[in-house]
Amino acid sequence: MDHFQLKDGVLHAEDVSLRRIAEEVGTPVYIYSRATLARHARVFRDALGALDNPHIAFAVKANPNLAVLRILASEGYGADVVSGGELTRALKAGMKPEDIVFSGVGKTHAELLQGLEAGIGQFNIESEEEGYELAAIAQRHGKRAACALRVNPDVDARTHEKISTGKSENKFGVPLDRAADIFARLAREDGLEMRGVAVHIGSQLSTLEPLETAFGKVGALIEELRAAGCSVTHADLGGGLGVPYKAGEQLPSPAEYGAMVARVTKDWGVRLMFEPGRVIAGNAGVLLTRVIRAKRSGNGPPFVVVDAAMNDLARPAMYGAWHDFDAVQPTGDRMTAHIVGPICETGDTFAMDRECDALVAGDLAVFRTAGAYGATMASSYNSRGFVAETLVDGDRYAVVADRIAADAIMDAERVPDWLT
Ligand SMILES: *Cc1c(COP(=O)(O)O)cnc(C)c1O
């Protein structure tokens, strides 16, 4: 459930009319709902109610906006970060260092050091090589890094290939059949406190079976590790729960996920950790756009050209993803159209042959479910600026990320003297 609803015929975020935000901030603009974010955070936590003190770390890459992170921090969430930049953001947003998990296959020396100096709660080590590098840095600085070893369970998450991470051919984690040996060797390093295992098989999962299969393999690994004399006190089950992108679409609920986790992990005797991203933020945001013009083309449906483009919302171009597209003031009339942005690339297509609200030039519309992997993936392709972000709270809203104009981006460019 989200808080983007029609009121008196106009789409609102909570109690703020999207027309008002368009007039005051301009379009395209992302709009997040605080009540929806908080609600999703609570629903997910409640779904894990049968577990003993689970640790929940929001996957910052899904929506790294400082205001969004602040809301989740106040809901008791920690952060799962995958870069030094995300770590800096999580700390700035008020997340406690000990609640931060550092994931990622390519943490640099500088990033490992940054995490150690910040005193983060856990590093999810993705290779034996990374483990030795972290151990050396930790020893040199008189520290001990709490770590989980990320395993690749070779499970097909049955999601889009670009966001599948748990197949043996994917770059993430260490192979399951080598994990026990690697764990035991790393556990002998003075700089490391090897305390757990981690798994994350992909994003936008639409069934629970691949997760259950992966968790089963993690459970077997924990037994194997303990039989070999290793201590395992933590298990990080990652993120990945999908969200409905189409009205009426049925996906496993957080409650079903929580029940499955409780059943599969009941004898593990560890503190469980989670890294949800999309399920918290996805339906807590929309991308508001204005129709530039509708263009007739051949005999097919018209092209509705909107002022948002693939640089603002990359998911359709990148993953062929579907986003529901609705008018801000629907008249009841419908049309079939191709929905495209202005960028000079055919990939800049949000939808083909889409049945949607009838729209004419100047009308406002939203792409729904844009709160995760939306603004964070924006670029300035075609010398378009960076899209603005706003946060609604009841009957008020604030700009939580300024629009960065193309001119400001150009200010960072230099023409060397020897070209003038
Ligand atoms: C992306 C990612 C997540 C979050 O995935 P969602 O599908 O958004 O829940 C969690 N953990 C890791 C390691 C990730 O890379």
Image (cartoon, helix red, strand yellow):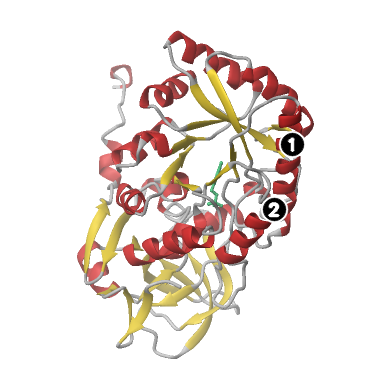
Point out residue 398 in the picture as x, y percentages from the top left corner: 22, 59
Q: Amino acid at mark 2?
A: Val
Q: Quadrant of residue 128?
A: top right
Can you name the residue that lies furthest to the right here?
177
Point out residue 334 in the picture as x, y percentages from the top left corner: 49, 87
Task: Label 1: state its secondary structure.
Answer: helix
Give the position of the C terminus as an image quadrant. top left
Can you name the residue that lies furthest to the bottom here?
332
Q: Which residue is mark 1?
A: 223
Left or right: where 304 falls relative to 72: right
Point out residue 362 in the picture as x, y percentages from the top left corner: 32, 75
Q: Which residue is mark 2?
A: 264
Left or right: where 274 falls relative to 164: left
Can you name the residue that lies furthest to the top here?
140
Q: CA distance from mark 2 to mark 1?
A: 14 Å
Q: Amino acid at mark 1?
A: Glu
